[in-house]
């Protein structure tokens, strides 16, 4: 009888979870059969999935369970006080020349260049998960003023993970957005959320498109995708080259270190600024998230004049203390002679001026 009841509960939980993932809108929708006809034309797509160009290990369930235990028993994983912010009204349309950037924490940015406004991976939500008990955003001294994000020419997405693509954020900002430029397959989520298909353009690696005088090129990254257990790697992940009339920027998205950084640097560099992932790493999944020292090497490979470490300062998605990414990155960058910047969350800065920033995380 006990076995019967236990089996029944497991079946009920499984069926409930399956129904939840299929009906809750925040999961989005993987590409349907008609959309897969387009995906099959990609050299990076076979066996119903996208693949990395280098052999890539993601880590297994044992690695995840070990990470959960480590996170639960290690101090300093999250900040004890709200992180300082400087949201200096960067959201209205600007008329001045040059290239300015505002960091919202993690991998979310507003770029103002060539008189256009580009929003990258706009995850403004409080939880990086499809459920309310997922990884919560670190406390900020002041919240992200999402309602003031306006006049957006392009939303650029790197992949479909929850800490980069947020359902509620997309619904909130959509009326202010002219165009979405995304990796292959990611548009299926946007269309499922009611976004006008005419506003969505999907690119494969090495494809490029132009909008408002700015060229956007999707480049290789070494990562994976999926928003549920049944849609792993059905959409593509990418890094991006953003080329305006005066400035060239690289955005890494997520991913492990690989030969692609030098290839991108040789083909599209040098860059005025490279925004490179340096957080949420673990030795057990180093193929899909770089260690900070590798992030510094990636900056050298890309031939970037300035580098900004990203993918930290918002969520606890791995087992390292929250300060570890920026501390290790700056130490390695100083050792290698890499010029870097580290603004406050919400602080708008120009990439044409020296901007070392304060070591705000130390205080």
Image (cartoon, rainbow, N blue to C red):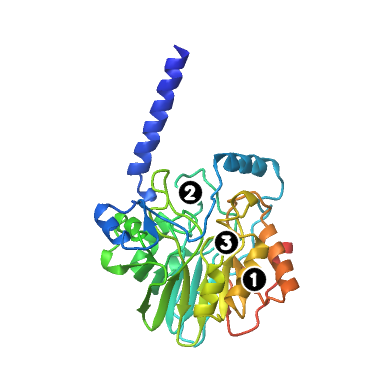
- At numbered mark 2, what does the secondary structure look like: helix, strand or loop? loop
Residue 353 lies in quadrant: bottom right
Residue 83 lies in quadrant: bottom right
Asked if 339 appears above or below 361 in the picture, the reply is below
- At numbered mark 3, what does the secondary structure look like: helix, strand or loop? loop
Question: Of residues 145 and 324, which is closer to you in this image?
Answer: 324
Q: Residue furthest top?
A: 1
Q: Is residue 161 left or right of residue 184?
A: right
Compare marks 3 and 2 and give the one earlier in the sequence: 2
Check residue 129 in the rendering and tell me which mark sits there, or answer none: 2
Q: Quadrant of the N terminus?
A: top left
Q: Position of residue 237 (x, y in %)?
A: 44, 61
- Local crowd at mark 2 within 10 Å, few (<14), some, or many (≥20)? some
Q: Distance between the Cα atoms at labels 3 and 1?
A: 12 Å
Q: Which residue is mark 3?
A: 311
Disc 2 + disc 1, Cβ < 8 Å: no
Q: Position of residue 205 (x, y in %)?
A: 41, 68
Point 53% across, 64% down: residue: 107
Q: Which residue is mark 1?
A: 342
Q: Distance between the Cα atoms at labels 3 and 2?
A: 16 Å
């Amino acid at each position: 009888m006990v076995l019967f009841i236990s089996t029944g509960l497991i079946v009920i939980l499984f069926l409930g979870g399956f129904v939840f993932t299929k009906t809750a809108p925040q999961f989005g929708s993987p590409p349907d059969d008609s959309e897969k006809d387009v995906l099959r034309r990609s050299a990076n797509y076979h066996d119903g999935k996208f693949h990395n160009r280098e052999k890539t290990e993601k880590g297994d369930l044992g690695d995840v369970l070990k990470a959960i235990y480590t996170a639960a028993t290690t101090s300093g994983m999250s900040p004890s006080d709200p992180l300082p912010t400087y949201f200096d009204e960067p959201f209205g349309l600007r008329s001045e020349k040059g290239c300015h950037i505002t960091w919202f924490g993690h991998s979310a940015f507003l770029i103002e260049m060539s008189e256009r406004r580009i929003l990258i991976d706009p995850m403004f939500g409080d939880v990086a998960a499809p459920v309310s008990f997922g990884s919560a955003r670190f406390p900020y001294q002041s919240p992200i003023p999402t309602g003031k994000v306006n006049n957006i020419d392009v939303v650029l997405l790197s992949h479909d993970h929850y800490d980069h693509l947020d359902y509620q954020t997309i619904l909130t900002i959509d009326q202010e957005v002219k165009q979405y430029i995304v990796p292959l397959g990611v548009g299926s989520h946007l269309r499922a959320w009611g976004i006008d298909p005419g506003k969505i353009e999907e690119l494969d690696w090495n494809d490029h498109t132009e909008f408002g005088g700015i060229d956007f090129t999707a480049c290789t990254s070494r990562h994976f995708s999926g928003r549920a257990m049944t849609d792993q790697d059905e959409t593509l992940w990418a890094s991006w080259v953003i080329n305006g009339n005066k400035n060239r920027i690289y955005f890494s998205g997520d991913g492990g270190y690989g030969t692609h950084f030098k290839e991108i640097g040789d083909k599209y560099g040098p860059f005025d600024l490279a925004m490179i992932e340096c957080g949420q790493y673990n030795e057990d999944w180093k193929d899909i998230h770089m260690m900070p020292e590798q992030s510094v090497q990636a900056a050298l490979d890309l031939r970037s004049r300035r580098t900004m470490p990203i993918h930290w300062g918002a969520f606890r998605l791995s087992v390292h203390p929250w300060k570890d990414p920026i501390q290790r990155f700056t130490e390695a960058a100083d050792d290698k002679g890499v010029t870097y910047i580290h603004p406050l969350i919400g602080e708008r800065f120009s990439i044409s001026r020296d901007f070392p920033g304060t070591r705000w995380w130390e205080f």
